[in-house]
Image: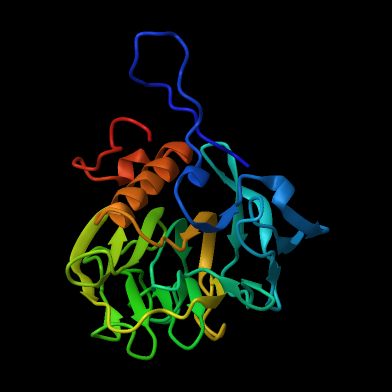
């Protein structure tokens, strides 16, 4: 488990605060961190399994016909998982996992580098159930970002494109929020801590509580996304002040940005642009 200790902190003493730990945010349900090489099980050079951090999520298996590589690339000196172009492979849990609260609350934040987009529905990650979602490319040869929603979860079936700029071959922090703790239940998609021009819709029907998680594939596993994977965190956030999901997701965006050395991705008005959480 790789944590980040901020070098800049408030206080008159010389002792820094403890490292920020995502477990301090309530209802962490899934945590997959490629920088922790002890969580990666290999057969030769190929990854066969990817274990969650602690008890936060199920072990994921290589569910395709190709190789997932560990250590082939690094970011900020930290290990990455690489999904080569042309590969027919992805990671998924063997059954399902509880990733959404009984009240439909959920948010997830991940750091990815999509490459070699081949279809609109190539997905960075997806939850597969009756009511579910996928974070997809929104273009057949570039990455602009959309949130695909299943079985009337949202007032529309697709949120996006999120960006007017192609993000293919670039690192991106992607955030999906499903909240009913606001006056109007809503679903949001953010890229690099910012709202795009098409970023939300009304939250009609709750996501299913138990979901099959896939990394680098869409909901049925037949659209694979090539690229590099750093880290993904998923929360089944239940209750609390109105803005909890937004404040917590910003903490995770800041955590990922500072840990992986991509603070430049955050907008100037992000609360963790100049100081780590």
Give the color scheme: rainbow, by chain, secondary structure or one colour: rainbow
Residue 223: x, y in percent? 51, 82
Q: Is residue 45 left or right of residue 149?
A: right
Quarter assignment of residue 66:
bottom right
Q: Residue at x 33, y 56 (%)?
A: 245
Closest to the observer, 223 or 186: 186
Q: Quadrant of the N terminus?
A: top right
Quarter assignment of residue 239:
bottom left
Q: Quadrant of the C terminus?
A: top left
Check the image and name the residue furthest to the right: 44
Check the image and name the residue furthest to the bottom: 151
Residue 154: x, y in percent? 28, 82
Q: Residue at x 46, y 81 (%)?
A: 208
Residue 216 position (above or below residue 56): below
Residue 115: x, y in percent? 47, 65
Q: Is residue 80 left or right of residue 5?
A: right
Q: Is residue 193 left or right of residue 33?
A: left
Closest to the observer, 274 or 170: 274
Q: How many tags in the picture?
A: 0
Closest to the observer, 195 or 90: 195
Residue 170: x, y in percent? 39, 55
Closest to the observer, 142 or 78: 78
Q: Residue at x 21, y 66 (%)?
A: 164
């Amino acid at each position: 488990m790789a944590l980040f200790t901020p070098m800049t902190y408030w206080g008159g003493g010389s002792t820094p605060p403890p490292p920020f730990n995502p477990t301090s945010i309530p209802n962490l349900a899934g945590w997959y961190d490629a920088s922790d090489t002890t969580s990666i099980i290999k057969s030769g050079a190929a990854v066969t399994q990817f274990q969650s951090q602690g008890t936060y999520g199920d072990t994921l298996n290589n569910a395709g016909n190709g190789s997932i590589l560990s250590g082939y690339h690094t970011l900020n000196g930290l290990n990455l998982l690489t999904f080569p172009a042309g590969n027919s492979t992805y990671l998924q849990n063997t059954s399902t996992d509880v990733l959404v609260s009984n009240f439909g609350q959920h948010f997830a934040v991940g750091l990815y580098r999509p490459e070699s987009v081949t279809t609109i529905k190539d997905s960075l990650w997806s939850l597969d159930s009756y009511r579910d979602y996928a974070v997809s490319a929104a273009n057949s040869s570039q990455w602009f970002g959309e949130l695909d929603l299943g079985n009337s979860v949202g007032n529309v079936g697709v949120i996006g494109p999120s960006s007017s700029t192609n993000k293919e071959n670039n690192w991106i922090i992607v955030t999906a929020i499903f909240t009913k703790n606001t006056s109007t239940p809503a679903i949001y998609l953010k890229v690099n801590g910012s709202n795009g021009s098409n970023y939300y819709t009304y939250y009609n029907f709750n996501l299913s509580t138990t979901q099959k998680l896939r990394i680098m594939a869409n909901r049925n596993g037949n659209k694979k996304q090539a690229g590099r994977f750093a880290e993904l965190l998923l929360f089944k956030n239940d209750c609390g002040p109105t803005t909890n999901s937004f404040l917590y997701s910003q903490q995770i965006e800041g955590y990922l940005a500072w840990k992986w050395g991509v603070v430049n991705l955050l907008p100037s008005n992000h609360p963790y642009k100049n100081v780590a959480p």
